[in-house]
Amino acid sequence: MAIHEQSLPYIRAISPYQPGKPITQLAREMGLAVEQIVKLASNENPLGMSPKARAAVHEAIGGLARYPDDFALKQALAERTGLGMEQLVLGNGSNDVLDLVARVFLAPGRSAIFAQYAFAVYPLATLAAGGEPIAVAARDHGHDLDAMRAAIRPDTRLIWIANPNNPTGTFVPYPQLRAFLQSLPGDVIVVLDEAYNEYLPPAERVDTTAWLATMPNLVITRTFSKIYGLAGLRVGYALTSAEIADLLNRVRQPFNCNNLALAAAAAALDDHPFVATSYALNRAGMEQIVAGLKRLGCTHIPSHGNFVTFRVADAPQVNQNLLKQGVIVRPIAAYGMPEWLRVTIGTESECARFLAALEGSL
Ligand SMILES: *Cc1c(COP(=O)(O)O)cnc(C)c1O
């Protein structure tokens, strides 16, 4: 019998995640110099990493013969959030934490709910654990919370929500989200993925960690990959009840965050000037790109993240035209949005490069 058929059928059903095209790959394909290429495809921080994190990585290199010690980062996160360290689970990126939640609560015969156009990792993690994905039709490209509640079945164990959502940038205001969570059966686990939380304007932000006091079924995930600029080091975390954290820790690899990542994340968490500069740059770049898209007649979905999704007549062709000019954006046909492209907010000059290239690509 073929090896393929020895695998679990629900693993065979998975379509692999499609990452943004790496800069070096485009350089090879188009014969371009790496320096000519602008990558706005993976919602990375255009300013790079926090200088404090960089210094911390240099310092941590001397300790690489030792297994990682995650105490300092967990303590810093506990202090920052006001939660106990027993309510924290670190991940090799928040993606790792999402997988842990799926492994703990899903299996064949159990289902998980997420919105149409929600983050691609939700169906992946659900399927990899043998769970059945239930995609609920979106409303205005965002979460239709009433429909998601109505989709709950007796075998539903998990609901995935990204707020703001990627790739649409949509955002559910917190009062609405809170009412939704309070209306759910207490035995359904909710993952609230806040990868873009730090990009929300202070007036829109709410400290969701306070909800954990009354919602033991809630798992909030956050990451160092976005505003903290550490996507390549892979650090994220879950904030949840001590009960769920204990379960996640049972399946977590003991040393899933490496020494350099732990040191960098702890330093980045304290680098307030870097976070503030990154936030301000994103606001300005968002205005610049949205104004440009309007000028070029492209419809966009108002975004609360560090990226914006816009519609063009022929997305594969426009994408190809952009690539030829050394600009990498993200086609999102795999999300069921074949007419749309997603662009990450870059520096002022990167945004200008993108808009100029787009103008010649439509
Ligand atoms: C980028 C992103 C993440 C973060 O992934 P990491 O594994 O932490 O790099 C999580 N959720 C969403 C919705 C994202 O867009």
Image (cartoon, rainbow, N blue to C red):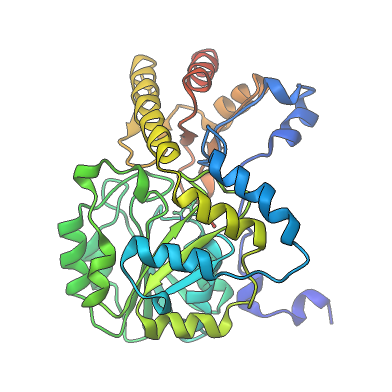
The residue sitting at 54% across, 72% down in the picture is 127
Q: Position of residue 265 (x, y in %)?
A: 53, 54
The residue sitting at 37% across, 20% down in the picture is 288
The residue sitting at 33% across, 71% down in the picture is 83
- Residue 258 visible somewhere in the drawing: yes
Q: Position of residue 143 (x, y in %)?
A: 29, 56
- Residue 114 visible somewhere in the drawing: no
Q: Is residue 361 above or below residue 316?
A: above
Q: Position of residue 282 (x, y in %)?
A: 39, 32
Q: Is residue 356 left or right of residue 80?
A: right
Picture quadrant where residue 201 is located: top left
Q: Is residue 185 left or right of residue 67?
A: left
Picture quadrant where residue 77 is located: bottom left
Residue 260 or residue 22, whichever sits in front: 260
Q: Is residue 278 above or below residue 250?
A: above
The residue sitting at 63% across, 77% down in the picture is 253
Question: Looking at the rendering, in which quadrant would you find the N terminus?
Answer: bottom right
Q: Is residue 311 above or below residue 255?
A: above
Q: Is residue 240 above or below residue 307?
A: below
Residue 264 or residue 103, whichever sits in front: 264
Q: Position of residue 261 (x, y in %)?
A: 61, 57
Number of dots carrying numbers: 0
